[in-house]
Image (cartoon, coloured by chain):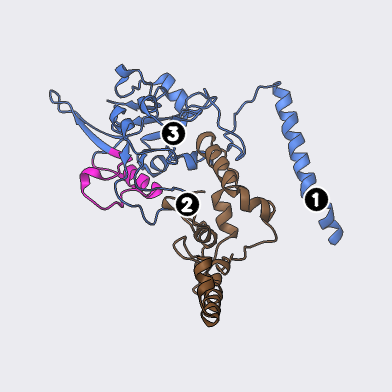
Chain colours: A blue, B brown
Amino acid sequence: MTQVKDLTDPSRRKFVGASVGVTGAMLIGPGIFLHQVAQAKPDAEAVTDKVRWGMLVDTNKCATGCDDCVNACAKENGWANEKGPDEVKVQWMRKVDLKEKSTGREASLPVMCQHCEKPPCVDVCPTGASFKREDGIVLVDKHICIGCRYCMMACPYKARSFVHSPVENHDDYMPRGMGVVESCTFCVHLVDKDKSPACVTSCKEKALLFGDLNNKNSEIAIRVAKENSRQIRQDLKTNPGVRYQGI
Amino acid sequence: MIQQFNTLSLTSRLGVIVGLILVLVLVTPIFADVPKPAIPQAKGDKCIADTDYMRRNHMDLLLHQRDLTMHEGIRVREKSLKNCLTCHAVYNKQKQAVSYKDKRHFCNSCHSYAAVKIDCFECHTSTPMAKDKNSGI
């Protein structure tokens, strides 16, 4: 019995698996894969501009009055517990209801940081705290943010918030503090672990789709190539990574 | 001063000398005996580098890791603040990890001694990571 156990060496199994995989890939041809399997970025590897993270919001599916995505965002990232008046409360994400007066058609959509290709917030930041990652996610480096709020003024989407009151009991993966600006991070801590942002996973209507716009095989890239979608304030030519359908 | 001292009587001179010695004896402990910080024992056999190196350079390691993680998304554990806190956690009698506000906290034990104010924990949590949160991290 013990002998049998010794024979099933896990490293051997791995080798067999790997060699099968290699032959499989070789049959199709060098560099050509039938399926690009989504793989988590290794922790030690830097993000690259080969990836452009984006989101597609189908407002036809987005239900008026539902704010599951906003609540999920608040829970995941630990905002919305601030004390103080409503006007100064932190808001990473909000629901906006639209109504066309002449026809009466209504639409509801979540608005958050649009993760622009040319972000105005980055342009105006005097310290370099506001920056765009190689993979297109726009972030605030709170270590070097001085809380001047220029970026909040520059953002056409009103996506950023200033933390006015001390933050307590936040989660360890989401450090937060008073005196700096913050906004939607596309849940970067989850994205780096190959997971979707909290708002996307929380949406029951499946109105939100997250993915790599640069990868032609990804669902989001296929859909934006085939279906009509638009960006908010396209005229500003910031080229947001968040796109909307049905508005 | 010395001339004045010489004019004094022998007993007065003795008195002055004894007085000076007494003052020295009383004052010296204030300079000599600042209690050394009680540095809490960490978990595991050894740190990621020698103690001497870590004492001098931990801030540089943390700063480097901070920029890599923030700007490039490199999330290796080794030199992260979270990794420090995992091994260097100090627990109270209720077996709960104490926060930076507590004098027993690993960082605080030395930083209060050295009078170096750090603001890491204005935003970061100072206790080890909770095992299971709603996030996948």
Q: Would you call the spot at circle 3 few (<14 residues within 10 Å), some (14-19), or many (20 or more)?
A: many
Q: Can residue A61 be seen in this view?
A: no
Residue that badge 2 annotates: B118
**Element at label 2:** loop
Q: Which residue is drawn at 36% across and 35% down?
A: A207
Name the kind of residue labelled 2 in the image: Ile
Give the letter of the chain under mark 1. A
* Quarter of the figure with residue A204: top left
What is the residue that sits farthest to the front in this orientation? B7
**The N terminus of chain A, quarter of image:** bottom right
Residue that badge 3 annotates: A210
Name the kind of residue labelled 3 in the image: Phe
**The C terminus of chain A, quarter of image:** top left
Side of A86 relative to A210 (left or right)? left
Span colored in magenta: A65-94
Name the kind of residue labelled 1 in the image: Asp
Foreground pick, A53 / B113: B113
Real-space CA distance between mark 1 and mark 2, rounded to the nearest whole angstrom: 50 Å
Real-space CA distance between mark 3 and mark 2, rounded to the nearest whole angstrom: 38 Å
Side of A26 relative to A224 (left or right)? right
Name the front one of labels 3 and 1.
3
**Element at label 3:** strand
Do the numbered discs 1 and 2 sit on residues whose CB atoms are within 8 Å? no
Residue A61 x/y as whole percent: 31, 34
Q: Which of marks 3 and 1 is nearer the N terminus?
A: 1
Do the numbered discs 3 and 1 sit on residues whose CB atoms are within 8 Å? no
Residue A227 x/y as whole percent: 38, 21
Q: Are marks 3 and 1 on the same chain?
A: yes
Q: Would you call the spot at circle 2 few (<14 residues within 10 Å), some (14-19), or many (20 or more)?
A: few
What is the residue that sits farthest to the right in this orientation? A3
Name the front one of labels 3 and 2.
2
Residue that badge 1 annotates: A9
